Image: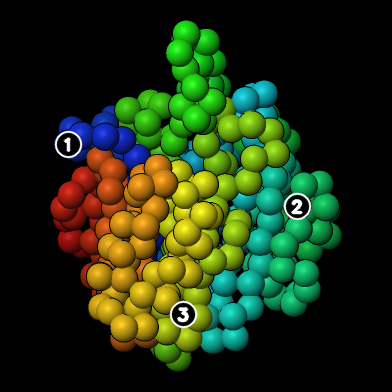
Amino acid sequence: MVVLAVHGGAGGDGPWRGMTDADPQRVACMQALLADIGQRLASGELAASEAVCLAVECMENEPLYNAGRGSVLDAEGNISMDASIMRGHDQAAGSVVGLQSSRHPVRAAERLMENGWPVMLAGPAGDVFAAENGVEQVEKAWLETQLRRAQWNKWRRERLRPGATDEEDALLDHDAEHDGWGTVGAVALDVHGNLAAATSTGGMTGKPPGRVGDTPIIGAGTWADKHIAVSCTGVGEAFIRTAAAHAVASFHKDRSLESAAEAMLDLVEPLGGRGGVIAVNQKGEVVMPFRTMLMYRGWYRDGVVDVGIGPSFLQSS
Ligand code: ASP
């Protein structure tokens, strides 16, 4: 059995209010990539690590997700993108922090992983490495969308509200717009029984320049070993403080996958870590719990694609 599962970020409070005008485009993106990459994974054409990288690249291309083109803007109105990838069977990993000109941060992370050393690169050195390793470089204006600028303008106006705290200033994407955009991630199990995970983000709207969330931190936002692959989304600081992705792996040693993922969310919640997680294990079991209004998510399993935003899946295809 092969599995490919993806998320497009979590956020929002209260009951899900149904699809927004922009949601069909996000759903179509997930469905298309799950059907295509899932089938190629099933045929044995793709290894798990290439499948998760391609899946995240598709979502980095979709401007309505908060990764690659369409990333959110930091407090100074700039884009800086983080991504990581991990391969389960040998625990090889690659991670980039604060990229500003690479079209596909996850591909930069994958090239680092293939390179073997170092595991992480930050700032301009990450973009230079990416460019030297064939990752397309783009202008800042290409990465930024009108929607993100409008969202940032709104954040800036509201930030000036008396009583706003620093913590409230950096918003999860969905919270800012009451609409869904988010960090993206993928986990996969291939025909050889190998696992991989990848995650990519523009971070949080209004984040201080230089802020690093959980996404590029191996063990926090992303983890894969011989038994499990995990990708997280949510308020990154709490996921860092609990080594969240690795915590799911640790809990899964003596608990079901579902209970392991819920136990991790129990850990991050008291630290303000609203969010969600996707995980797949060696048996091909998949879980996608979240503690927010919504989490964009979907999977390919046994030739079937399911996607969801609110509490239940939308449809099968
Ligand atoms: N985890 C990401 C971060 O803190 C945000 C997200 O998941 O939407 O940068």
Q: Residue at x 18, y 49 (%)?
A: 311
* Disc nearer the start of the sequence (2/1): 1
Residue position for label 3: 195
Q: Are marks 3 and 1 in contact (CB under 8 Å)?
A: no
Foreground residue, 129 or 211?
A: 211
Residue 33: horizontal and vertical position, in percent? 40, 60
Q: Is 265 placed left or right of 123 in the picture?
A: left
Instruction: In the displayed orientation, state which residue is furthest to the front.
Output: 270
* Disc nearer the start of the sequence (2/3): 2
Q: Secondary structure at mark 1?
A: loop
The circle on residue 43 is: none
Q: CA distance from mark 2 to mark 3?
A: 26 Å
* Disc nearer the start of the sequence (3/1): 1
Asked if residue 41 is positioned above or below residue 163 in the image, the reply reads below
Residue position for label 1: 15
Give amino acid for label 3.
Leu
The circle on residue 122 is: 2
Residue 129: horizontal and vertical position, in percent? 81, 58
Foreground residue, 27 or 222?
A: 222
Characterize the local packing of mark 3: few (<14), some (14-19) or many (20 or more) Cα atoms within 10 angstroms: many
Q: CA distance from mark 2 to mark 1?
A: 38 Å
Q: Is mark 2 within 8 Å of ligand 1?
A: no
Give amino acid for label 2.
Ala
